[in-house]
């Protein structure tokens, strides 16, 4: 996608300086995208006492699963906010994880669907 955008920057009728500026912006976007999409793992758990929690590189954190979470037979598009961090001007940042059905054993994925439906999305 970024390659096509870079080609489009040079194929249009813009002046040379604007083409260069647009190319730099596309390259910066590509670098940011590569940095953001590095594979990482996380663990998600639910308990009656602590509700939903997620474990990442820095430990366990309590989260709120948002109503914008999308659940299908093939994937869960998990939208959540940390309860205790990532607040900017009073607003919590929304985080997203994609959980594909083949990333978990069939029973575990089914249990995840049921648990998210019954405890998180209201």
Image (cartoon, helix red, strand yellow):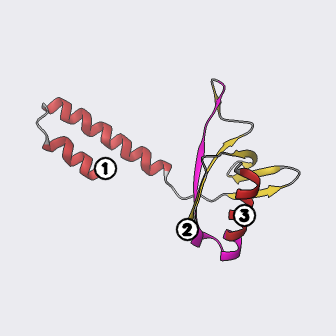
Magenta highlight range: 90-109
Asked whether residue 94 is drawn in magenta, I would say yes
Residue at point 74%, 39% (across, down): 83
CB-based contact (under 8 Å), mark 3 and mark 2 = no
Q: Residue at x 66, y 57 (%)?
A: 42
Give residue 74's mark. 2
The quadrant where residue 76 appears: bottom right
Sequence-first tag of 3 and 2: 2
Give the side of residue 44 with respect to residue 30, left or right.
right
Tell me which corner region of the image, top left, top right, bottom left or bottom right, holds residue 93.
Answer: top right
Mark in front: 3 vs 1 = 3
Q: Secondary structure at mark 1?
A: helix
Q: Which residue is mark 1?
A: 2
Choose between 50 and 18: the one closer to the eye.
50
The answer to whether marks 3 and 1 mark residues whose Cβ atoms lie closer than 8 Å is no
> Of marks 3 and 1, which one's residue comes earlier in the chain?
1
Q: Position of residue 114 (x, y in %)?
A: 72, 64
Measured as percent of width and height from the top left, residue 34 is found at 43, 51
* Residue topped by disc 3: 114
Residue toward you, 4 or 31: 4
**Residue 56 drawn at (x, y percent):** 68, 52
Element at label 3: helix
Q: Could you give the CA–CA distance between mark 3 and mark 1, rounded to whole angstroms?
A: 38 Å
Q: Alpha-carbon distance for marks 2 and 1?
A: 28 Å
Q: Residue at x 36, y 40 (%)?
A: 28
């Amino acid at each position: 996608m970024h390659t096509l955008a870079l080609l489009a920057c040079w194929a249009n009728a813009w002046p040379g300086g604007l083409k260069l500026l647009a190319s730099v912006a596309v390259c910066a976007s590509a670098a940011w995208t590569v940095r953001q999409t590095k594979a990482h793992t996380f663990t998600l758990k639910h308990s009656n006492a602590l509700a939903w929690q997620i474990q990442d590189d820095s430990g366990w954190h309590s989260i709120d699963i948002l109503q914008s979470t999308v659940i299908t037979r093939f994937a869960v598009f998990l939208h959540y906010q940390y309860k205790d961090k990532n607040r900017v001007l009073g607003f919590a940042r929304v985080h997203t994880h994609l959980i594909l059905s083949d990333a978990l054993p069939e029973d575990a994925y089914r249990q995840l669907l049921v648990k998210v439906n019954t405890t998180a999305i209201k």
